[in-house]
Image (cartoon, rainbow, N blue to C red):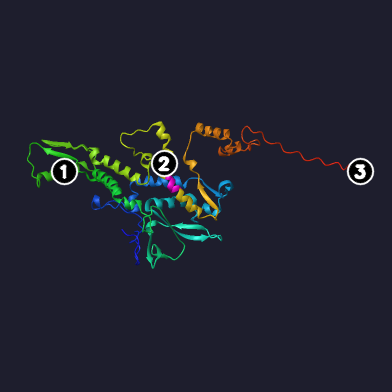
Amino acid sequence: MSLWRRQRRSAGQVMGSAAPWVSVRSAGFADIDGGQIDTAMQSIAVRTAADLIASLGSELPVDVYRGTGRDLRAIPMPGYLEDPGGDGYGLPDWAYRVLISWLLRGNLFGEELARARAGHVTQVEVFHPDAVSGWLDDGTVVWQVNGRHVEKGMLHRRVNPVPGRVLGMSPIAYHASTIGVSLASTQFGLQWFGDGGHPTGILRNTEVPLDPDGNAKTAKQRFMAALRGRREPLVLGKGWEYQQIQVNPEESQFLETMGYSEAQCARMFGPGIAEVLGYSVKGASLTYSNLADRDLHLLKYALGKWLSRLERLLTEFLPRGQHVVLNRDALLATTTLQRYQAHASALGAKWKVPNEVRELEDLRPVPWGDEPVGVDPQPEPEPNPPADNKAGDE
């Protein structure tokens, strides 16, 4: 599907139109469109994988710094950055919407509502990516949001760039068939138990011949009437036998197909996501060592690129020379013993002082805590005594 043309295109033809809800029930299982956001999010793996990355990224502590190298200094975060959308929902909510847009559609669209005198943006409203369309008009990108033209101040940041295209690649559109298999297998299991893949039982008479359009139909109607809406016992006449047909769960829900397709959906979002969500490889087992390294693996190969993109975007909200850093250490949760051992190592190597460690542990500073361990604090120099003015006495 070509994303851009030289002529004007209507909304929905370039990127799709916004839809509040898209049902997965269709004429057939092959008709399910997994490339629509609201449809794809009905896949448990898609929703949980995207939510995992967006939640972890949006909840990390945000630090602001000025300078580089030896001149690097931590500074307070400006007040407007605590609510970049200006809607009262705060930075975590805004960052979550940004990450979800990137994860599902590969593009972030927003309108710049305010700028500082220094020129940097201070407030951006984030749009649903399917509500935005665009086209090239004499080499200039023209944007439209829900039918409204955005003349200036449109913010567009893409991921998964493709040569020759303005828009980034949409992961769920690219893997729509995989998501469709996941949704189709779930729908089949739902319809199996709702409608039944075959008769739920067999009512047989061993003595009286039955005519399909005559007494067999009458017997079926009376039998069903006796079963529905009553708690009374059922009494059958001579020669009647009822056999219930058992359902094999392995066949009814395609459990292996569901598990494989859900794992594939989770792997769309990066290495390690499927394993964290419980879609482990068949036959593999988690040991203490690989379980301890899983968080680091997740941060390095799956979360790192999203966090770096969010940092660059938030840095655009600051004056030149300042930048944002997301505290990744918050993802690497450790035990109390491991944390204390790390503190002891830092103090022993003298690249941290006691008050820095106490601050991390939410403890008050101590008077002797601003010097490295093992180094005696330098005594304050005594004031020079006043010089004797003997010459004046003479």
- Residue farthest to the right, as pictured: 394
Determine contact: label 3, label 1, CB under 8 Å.
Answer: no
Residue 199: % across, % down: 18, 42
66 sits to left or right of 140: right
Where in the figure is residue 320, as x and y percent of width and height?
54, 55
Of residues 168 and 205, the one nearer the viewer is 168
In the structure shown, which secondary structural element does the residue marked by tag 2 occupy? helix
Secondary-structure class at tag 1: helix
State the residue position of label 1: 222
Q: Does residue 306 belong to the magenta stretch?
A: yes
Which marked residue is nearer to the observer: mark 3 or mark 1? 3
- Asked whether residue 310 is drawn in magenta, I would say no
- Seen in the picture, residue 49 relative to 350 is either above or below; the reply is below
The residues bearing labels 3 and 1 have C-alpha atoms spaced at a distance of 134 Å
In the picture, the disc for residue 391 is none
Residue to which mark 3 is pinned? 393
Q: Where is residue 298 in the image (x, y as percent from the top left)?
A: 41, 41
**1 vs 2, front mark:** 2
Element type at marker 3?
Answer: helix
At label 3, which amino acid type do we have?
Asp
The residue labelled by disc 2 is 298
Label 3 and label 2: CA atoms lie apart by 81 Å
Q: Which mark sits nearer the N-terminus, 3 or 1?
A: 1
Pick whichever of labels 3 and 2 is earlier in the sequence. 2
Closest to the observer, 190 or 107: 107
Label 1, residues with CA under 10 Å away: few <14, some 14-19, many ≥20: few
Q: In which quarter of the image is the C terminus?
A: top right
